[in-house]
Each structure stands twice: as structure tokens, then as C-alpha cells.
Amino acid sequence: MDRIKLNIRDLAEVRWAGADFMKLGGKTLIYSGGNTHERGIGILLNVTMAESLGRWCPISDRVVVAKPLNLGIIQVYAPTSDSEDVEVEKFYEEIEKAKGYLKSQDIIIVMGDFNAKVRDKKIEDVVGPSGIGIVNVRGSRLIEWCQINDFIITNTWYQNHPRRRWTWKSLEDKRRIYESYVRGEDYVDVARLLNVKRTTAYNIVKRAEQNHGQIERPRGGHRHAKVTDAMRAVVHAVVEEHPDFTIRNINRELRTRLPQSPAISQTTISGILDGLLVTTKKLEDAPAERNSDRTKQQRHAYATWLMHEVQETEFIFIDEAGINIWTKHTRGRAVRGRRAVRVVQGRRGPNLTMTFAVSNVGGLIYHELTEGGMTGQRFNEFIGTVCRLYHPLNACFVIDDAPAHRQAVNLPLPQNFSVRYLPPYSPFLNICENAFALWKGNIKDSLAEVRDQLLREDHQQRMATLGQLAEQGTAVVTLHRMQAAFRGMQAYLPACFGLDDILM
């Protein structure tokens, strides 16, 4: 592709299941496949085309559409001549569906393998004089579609030598040549009409005779049929159920579940995983209750309440986050054989706790920085302060079920305030998480400028310096960002309504 300076390359018979895009050696591959590792198509884009890619859509395992720049690229892989007419018509309907994703002013290019032959004579402005031999049924359908949709078959307009116009001989042509031989006719003349070389015709007849009249032997031997779709499905299921399994464990589980299947090596298992686009990555532990039925029902109830109250209620999310006043480099230099040691004022100090009250209407309406962790008394006092300083028409405090928060529901609140607990294991529904991410990011940037100063200061001085940075960092928690976080939180509500698993 680089050698001949191609920007876009079409791929047929990718044989990958599903649809996705990936980076391959600096290029971008878009592919679309079915549920099994059969057929499948792809579009390979160089860096320039990939950067200008606007959108793409997998239609089926025979059609995919992509839109780089003002081009509309439709990659296709048509049914063969042995396919039923219903499948062929479905294929052309999928092309029409792909065209619907493009604009009228786009330059539409339909490329790929149509498994068709068109005649070697000009037909209007559709087929050029450099086509292939005798038109077949699939070629007639292609010509008809091009005439209706005002397309031209571009490769028939390039004057190439006949032997460079195609390399594949269809099964239909091979059958015609051999049947003429069986009938005692001059099969070489038939081959010439089909634009098949004389030596190729000899080989077709010779191989058919050797195979007792069978035109084409079944492809693939024992090794090709060794890994079945059932085995791939089991490997995929094992990875989904046990992401921490080694390749040896996966192979052992495969033999347990499919004892009648042939034994395969760990290298073959690795190849199956590559075909399934399974890679190794950092393994995270998720509590079993995170997506339990009880948690999903609580998320559903919370989402229902939120949508019912969103027009009339202001939501005030309250949560806390801690930082430690002791910050230091963890690596240093020393002579080989000796430890790297530095002298500091104390080995570790207490935590600072920042508590936010963040609203979808007022942004950060109140915050409080304290030394030490959060307690129930401190949390209740914080809520009381917010009630005294902030006076909305109708507001609800939204909090998680941390131990320090559990007495808040029993507080005597003004009539315009209420309390609602978040469902468990649902930080994505708490916009305080976004606020703390912004706040901590600002503190880390500021610490880079005063880190050496902190190392020379004692406990009280470090406390004052870090407290000052923490107060300054609250400026990044703006109303605009919190409203955006609230909209982002609402994007999870459909999954809550659908009782779906949500992994964070």
C-alpha cells in the first residue's frame, strides 16, 4: 500500500466477527463481519484518510460504508454465482441502505468484489471496451443496477492486456469447459469465448478427470477444519467468564466443555484469541454486587425518580475527597550499594478533607476544607451550613451511602430540602466525582511548582501551603462544567432503565 502510494485499500473475506476499527502499523482498518468467521469486508485507510474520516457504518458482512473527506466509500463483497437470487437482491438492498448514509454532494465510490463478469464491448456509458468476455447473470444484474443509479464500471475503461484484467476463473466457467469436453465438443473454442487461455483449459479438464469429474475439490484439509465455530464460541465464552485465565487454562477448559473436539495447542488458542480481537490488559477487580439484580433495581428506581423530579427540583450532590499534606518524590539517586535517603520534617501528616456541595443549577455552591477524615457529625454540620446559606425553591441533597452519611436522612431539614441516597456502586451518577477530578488535577499541576518548597517545610507550613492550593483549585469547578457533568450523568440513565450491566 505504501509502495504504490494508495490512500484507500479495499479488503474482502476478512473473516472477522463483529464490526470495529483498529490501528495497524500506522494505518486504520475498518471492518464489518457477521456472527461467525466467514466472509467479512474491510477498508484500510492511510494516515491522511484516517484523520479526515467523518463517520462509518457497518451494514452487514457484505457491505460497509465510510466517509473520509467528501468521499463516500462503499466496500462490498457480492454473493457468488452459486448463491440464490434472494441473497443477491438482499445484497443490492444493503448497498442502497449504505447510500442513505451519504449526502447527495458526496463523491460515491462503490468498490470491492462483485463476483460478476461484464462483456468486453461498450454498453452506453456504463461498461467500457475493456471488460471480460461473456456477461454472466451476476454481470447483467450489476449492469442493470449501474444504469438505474447512474454509475459506471470504471475498471472496464482501462485498456489492460486481457490476462491482466482478472486472475480468478469462476466455477461456472470451469463447468462449461469440462461439460463441452464430456460432450465431445471443442472445449478450447469454448475456453476462447470465455477468455480462458488454452493451457488453463487443458489444466481444468485434466484436474476434473483426475478427480472423477469433480470440477473443484473441497478446500482445506484436516488442519483447516480443526478449529470449528463451536470451539471459537467456547473460547470466547471462557474469556468472558474468566478474564484472568491463562492460555493453558483456556485450553484445559475447552477440552472439558468439548471433550469430543480435537486437541489443539496453546499456539492455536493464541491464534483464536487474536482472531477474536482479545488482548491482555490490566485486570481490575469488580465487586460481585456491582451489577447484582438488587443493585440494578435500585438504579432503575433512582433513574425513575430523577426523571420525574428533574423539571421541578434542584439536585445538590454532596461528597468528600481527601488529600494528604505529605507529598514527595518516590525515587532518587545514590552511589551503588547505598540507599537513597533524604531528611524530612516528619514522615507523614494527617489528611485534608474537601467537601463539595455541587448543584446542577448553581454549580459549586459551597465547599469546606478540614483536617482529618469525614465523620457523621461533620457531615451533618456541613448540610446544616448549606441550608443556611443557600435558599432554592425546591432542592434535594443527593448523597452516597457512606458510613458518615447515613444519619443525614434523619436531620430536621427546612421544607424546601430533602435527602435522596444514590444506588450502591454507582459513582457515574454522582457529579461530585467530576468536580473532584477537576479539583485534584489542578492541585497536582500546582504542586509541581512548589514541591521542593514543601519538602523543606515542617508540618504546619505544609498544611498551610497545601490548604492554600486546595482553596485555589476550587476555581476550576465552574457552573458550565458541572452542567456538562450533569448531562453526562444522564447518559447512563437508559442503561439504568434497561437493567443493564454498567462497568466502570
Image: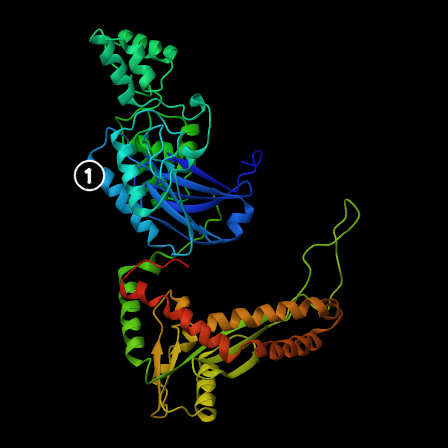
Percent of width and height locating residue 102: 38, 54
Front residue (pair 52, 360)? 52
Q: Is residue 96 or residue 447 the one in the foreground?
A: 96
Measuring from the top left, give residue 229's x and y in whole percent. 29, 33
Instruction: Looking at the picture, tell me which residue is in the foreground, 165 or 231.
Output: 165
Is residue 334 left or right of 196 when viewed as pictured?
Answer: right
User: How many numbered marks have been drawn onto this rendered protein structure?
Assistant: 1
Image x and y of residue 307, in percent: 30, 76
* Crowd rating for badge 1 (residues with CA inside 10 Å; few <14, some 14–19, many 20+): few
In the depicted structure, whether residue 434 falls above or below residue 358: above
Task: Look at the image and tell me whether residue 69 can be seen.
Answer: yes
The C terminus sits in image quarter: bottom left
The answer to whether residue 278 of the structure is visible from this angle is no
Residue corresponding to mark 1: 86
Q: Which amino acid does label 1 sit on?
A: Val
**What residue is rendered at 31% in x and 10% in y?**
188
Q: Which residue appears at 62% of the width and 71% of the height?
A: 443
Q: Residue 4's quadrant in the figure?
A: top right
Which type of secondary structure does the marked residue at label 1 adopt? helix
In the rendered image, the vertical position of residue 385 relative to residue 464, given as above or below: below
